[in-house]
């Protein structure tokens, strides 16, 4: 038997596989053993009820998908009364994903959801921020620092900051989240994208733009995971484009301590337990006793130095 356990701050997970927020619900209990997962990550909730974005909300693109769901939510009270009790039957940490449009609203929701039964809070700071002209908090280090400090003051629970691939300041944002009190980073959310129907010349999403997820996203978020693990001391959770155990292994080797599976579950509801078993098979086949042997084991010492490459390139 191999040791799949991994540590995310104060939490120890029995294995590194968990769902990405928005791709997991209680209904999956009819399909897979929810106790087999390392953690449960809920759909993102907001403080008040929300109906979400106009339809169509989802479209396929080559090898991936776009979505503009808009975070429909029944509100925090409904979640506390109806959803948290469901997960009490499982011996798996419960991570609640939250979203808000301002730092103060984030803090209010964070405080409200810090109740018994919740083990960690994933803060979706890659959502639009009305205090910064509609830009996501995680686009800039300053706004990341501001909202995470508010959140840290609102709860003693572990906070996982979900970052955005739509920034040119990946490491700066990661450091800002850590300095403001994040206990882990989820890297990353979807990539802002667009698709057009050439016959009608209309955008394929009702909200014009949406988030790219699926295999096309993985090279971007894998790069971000590698960069973040080089500068922060807190754990990083890889998220984006995971289809199989090979993808999870890439994230782990790049430095991630765990991985979130999203779009793959829409395609195959048993994706997560399949990935988990294939991960075990990989480790057993190579006499790898513990998951910790894989984390951050990328062999990059022979990589060409970027500065040297630029000087010598034709």
Image (cartoon, rainbow, N blue to C red):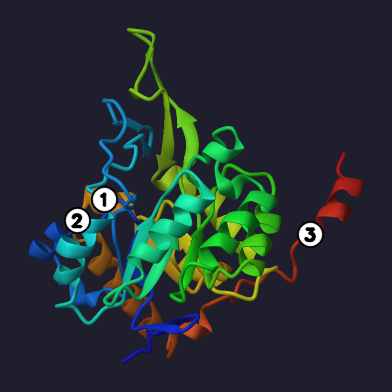
Frontmost residue, 243 versus 68: 68
Label 3 Cα neighbours within 10 Å, binned few <14 / some 14-19 / many ≥20: few
Mark 2–mark 1 contact, CB under 8 Å? yes
Q: What element carries label 1?
A: loop
Q: Position of residue 18 (x, y in %)?
A: 33, 67
Q: Can residue 122 be seen in this view?
A: yes
Q: Where is residue 216 in the image (x, y as percent from the top left)?
A: 46, 43
- Report, in whole angstroms, how far the alpha carbon at label 2 lies from the one at label 1: 6 Å
Q: Residue at point 43% right, 39% down?
A: 212
| Front: mark 2 or 3 | 2
Mark 1–mark 3 contact, CB under 8 Å? no
Label 2 Cα neighbours within 10 Å, binned few <14 / some 14-19 / many ≥20: some
- Report, in whole angstroms, how far the alpha carbon at label 2 lies from the one at label 3: 54 Å
Residue tagged 3: 304
Q: In this view, does 154 lie to the left or right of 166?
A: left
In the image, residue 70 above or below residue 222: above
Q: Residue at point 41% right, 22% down?
A: 208
Q: Residue 78 carries which label?
A: 2
Q: In which quarter of the image is the N terminus?
A: bottom left
């Amino acid at each position: 038997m191999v040791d799949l356990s991994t540590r995310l701050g104060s939490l120890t997970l029995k294995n590194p596989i968990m769902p990405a927020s928005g791709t997991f619900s209680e209904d999956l209990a009819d399909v897979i053993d929810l106790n087999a997962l390392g953690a449960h990550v809920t759909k993102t909730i907001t403080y008040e009820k929300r109906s979400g974005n106009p339809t169509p909300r989802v479209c396929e693109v080559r090898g991936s998908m776009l979505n503009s769901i808009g975070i429909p939510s029944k509100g925090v009270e409904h979640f506390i009364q109806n959803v948290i009790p469901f997960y009490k039957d499982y011996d798996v940490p419960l991570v609640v994903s939250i979203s808000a449009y301002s730092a103060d609203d984030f803090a209010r929701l964070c405080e409200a959801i810090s109740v018994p039964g919740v083990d960690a809070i994933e803060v979706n700071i890659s959502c639009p921020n009305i205090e910064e002209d509609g830009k996501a908090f995680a686009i800039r280090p300053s706004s990341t620092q501001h909202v995470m400090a508010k959140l840290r003051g609102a709860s003693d629970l572990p906070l996982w900051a979900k970052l955005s691939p739509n920034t040119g300041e990946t490491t700066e944002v990661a450091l800002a989240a850590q300095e403001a009190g994040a206990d882990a980073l989820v890297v990353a959310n979807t990539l802002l994208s667009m698709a057009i129907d050439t016959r009608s010349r209309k955008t394929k999403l009702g909200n014009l733009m949406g988030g790219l997820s699926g295999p096309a996203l993985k090279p971007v978020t894998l790069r971000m995971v590698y960069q973040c693990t080089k500068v922060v001391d807190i754990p990083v959770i890889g998220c984006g484009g995971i289809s199989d155990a090979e993808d999870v292994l890439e994230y782990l080797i790049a430095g991630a301590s765990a991985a979130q599976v999203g779009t793959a579950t829409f395609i195959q509801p048993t994706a997560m337990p399949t990935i988990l078993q294939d991960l075990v098979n990989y480790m057993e086949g190579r006499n790898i006793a513990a998951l910790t042997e894989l984390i951050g084991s990328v062999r990059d010492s022979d990589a060409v130095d970027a500065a040297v490459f630029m000087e010598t390139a034709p």
